[in-house]
Amino acid sequence: MDGDTTNQSLSALMADLGHRAKLASRVLASATTAQKNKALTAAATAIRADAEIIKAANAKDMAAAKEKNLTAALLDRLALNDARIASMVTGLEEIAALPDPVGATIAEWTRPNGLNISRVRTPLGVIGIIYESRPNVTADAGGLCLKAGNAAILRGGSESQHSSRAIHACLQRGLTEAGLPADAIQMVPTTDRAAVGEMLTMTKYIDVIVPRGGQSLVDRVMRDSRVPTFQHLTGLCHTYIHSAADAEKARKIVLNAKMRRTGVCGATETLLVDQNVAATILPPILNDLIAAGCEIRGDEAVQKLEPRAKVASPEDWDTEYLDAILAVKVVPDLDAAIAHIVTHGSEHTESIITEDSAAAERFMGALDSAIVMHNASTQFADGGEFGMGAEIGIATGKLHARGPVGVEQLTTFKYKVRGTGQTRS
């Protein structure tokens, strides 16, 4: 099924997906670790074997995307090559190697009356993942949900439909090979945008919604969803070069933080530089960035140091470019850098470059972003780099999950109370 659908048929389609996912989630909740790991490794093997099929499907998506004149950043997110397919395979294998969170005891204690109480991890149930152009999310999200004992309903963007379906077929083969229901990982089989609206109201079937995409998608989910959501705001990430920064270290980190991949949510979008070192540290950094194809938008102090820099507008300090554009500002000191980030940031990821450990601790303590770093590229804001195998996204909310959403964040808990005949007076 694809293309336009009537409201009645779409509602029936989505309800059927939800019903089957709910049934599958009950099977997964009691699946053994060995079963889940077998499904993950078999899916990884299938993706490796189907690499050419996946690339051919991706070529269709890329051709259509170019006809639609999608931006370079979106094309980069959409593209699959041998390295990215290998990364999906590795991600699934790493998820399989992780400890199984389901059934793990978080805390345990015994009351004076002899009751033994334990807090134990348990699956969330059915997770709906709504994402846009990145087809690798299909593997990451499906694999993580499976390891955490959850069924998944995946709704990828229309621009990645062929790629995502080819990857999804591999995931379902892995489930079948392990004796688990293929319905444990389902993909919405229509590109009708109304399917997203249906998912946001499926409180009978879906336990959590995870949006992964641009600001318009996230805004819609946060505004319209009646299902609980993992909040994922924009990745307006900052790197601050402190007065005690090592110049060569700063030069390498900033270039990587901005230009390694400009279309990821962990890419640095604003560079802040202490005024005491700007004249010496900043020119070679900006030269590296410009040579790499980055457009610089700077304040007056930056323009004096680099004539090629464009004038930064007030909107630049609030923009997630997801492109080869960087806003650069010279600030008086650490307090001013913190104040700027608090005012303009999205509480995603911030990094300080300094050899002063006290300044680093102050920076990381003062900011309430999901991830704070010291002497490291913001592009490390990634579940795989955190040792989680993969991630569904970076959660910036304050409740339940925060930072990279991995297997543990896709569980909740219940209490097990064991007695010997106690009654309450």
Image: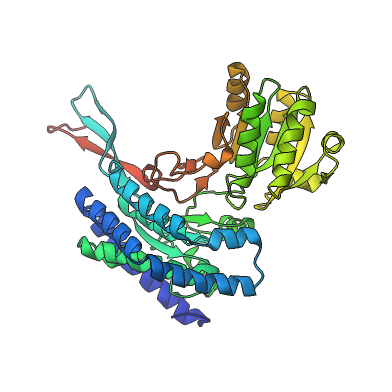
Left or right of 233, for residue 338: right
Q: Quadrant of the C terminus?
A: top left
Hey, which residue is sitting farthest left in the picture?
Answer: 420
User: In which image quadrant can residue 77 be found?
Assistant: bottom right
Q: Residue at x 61, y 35 (%)?
A: 253
11 or 243: which is nearer to us? Answer: 243
The answer to whether one can see residue 320 in this image is yes
Q: Is residue 351 left or right of residue 385?
A: right
Looking at the image, which is closer to me, 204 or 83? 83
Residue 113 in picture, x, y percent from top left? 20, 24
The picture places residue 227, in percent across and down from the top left corner, at 47, 57
- The scheme the figure's colours follow is rainbow
Number of marks in picture: 0
Residue at the spot x=51%, y=46% of the render? 394
The quarter of the rendered structure image containing the N terminus is: bottom left
Outermost residue toward the front in this view: 291
Identity of the residue drawn at 66% across and 38% down: 238
Question: Can residue 207 be seen?
Answer: no
Residue at figure coordinates x 29%, y 48% from the top left: 96
Q: Nearer the viewer, residue 298 or 107?
A: 298
- Where is residue 79? Give x, y as percent: 53, 62
| Closest to the observer, 201 or 78 | 78
| x and y, in percent, of residue 21 in the image | 33, 64
